[in-house]
Image: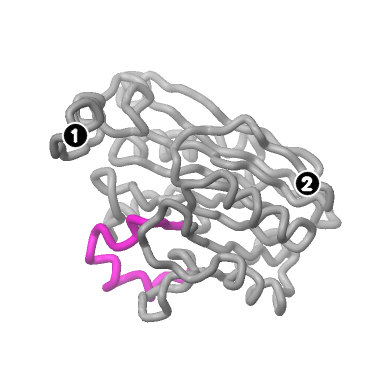
Amino acid sequence: MMNILFLGDVVGKPGRIVIKYFLDNYLDKYNIDFVIANLENASHGKGLTKNNFLDVVSHGIDVVTLGNHYLAKKEITTFIDDYDNLLRPLNLNKAHPGKGSNVFECLGKKIRVTNLIGRVFMNEGADNPFDALESVVATDEADIHIVDFHAEATGEKESLAWAFDGKISALIGTHTHVQTNDARLLKNKTFYLSDVGMNGPYNGILGASRESVIKRTWTGLPSVFGVEDDDTYLLNGVILTFNDLNQITDYQLLNLTFAAKEINQ
């Protein structure tokens, strides 16, 4: 048996704090063997710096995925090629540094993680995610294949999952920061979840400061979205349990809150 933990979008310092706290204190409780986390918003709410990457990974993360804010911190282009466990969306233009899919080993199993980005309501000019995933699946020999599909539209996420049902182990949605209530195994046993949620300030708006988001939404005036300074942290993730035949036999959604004063004491 193997338990793989997937943590949703990590938003700013509060997100980094809460997942480090969880990783330091709860991995044994949940019998976690392998950890994947999306860190595209981990530095000041948008992008990822090298210092933040190294700090968070040191707490037990095996693979980091990214998304549409991949290049928000320009320094990532200087270090992403140095780390095989740091993935950017595979279907971005090939001129972008970094890789979008890689294989890792855990407990004698080969685990492939693939990062993709959607095209519906997204402005990254990405290549077709269906074609990109098909090119990986065609030659893949990994025992387990987890896909982080960083996309806006639920229909696009569902379509990709159904198109590859039985060809990948799981398709987990990121980007919208709200954990959805549609976790399921599809007909050919691929796990699907539209969005795993976010890690960060519980009382923000998608992790951003309430005041800044309300101002722009209400008035249409420009407003810089800072990260909410909150007294409660949210942790969102999903644990996938695999048997010795590499089949998912169980899954558990994590939707936990922690008082900031308890973590920071």
Q: What residue is shown with label 2?
A: 186
Q: Is residue 17 visible?
A: yes
Q: What residue is shown with label 1?
A: 220
Horizontal and vertical percent for residue 113?
59, 62
Closer to the N terminus: mark 2 or mark 1? 2
Q: How many marks?
A: 2
Q: Is residue 225 above or below residue 261?
A: below
Horizontal and vertical percent for residue 130?
61, 66
Which residue: 43% across, 22% down? 258
The quarter holding residue 176 reads: top left
Q: Which residues are magenta?
A: 65-84
Horizontal and vertical percent for residue 242?
77, 49
Which residue: 55% across, 54% down? 148
Q: Is residue 140 left or right of residue 244?
A: left
Q: Residues within 10 Å of mark 2 (few under 14, many from 20)?
A: some
Residue 193 magenta: no
Name the secondary structure under disc 1: loop
Amino acid found under the numbered disc labelled 2: Leu
Horizontal and vertical percent for residue 135?
64, 76
Amino acid found under the numbered disc labelled 1: Gly
Name the secondary structure under disc 2: loop
Q: Is residue 249 left or right of residue 5?
A: right
Q: Residues within 10 Å of mark 1 (few under 14, many from 20)?
A: few
Q: Is residue 251 above or below residue 260?
A: below
Which residue: 64% across, 74% down? 136
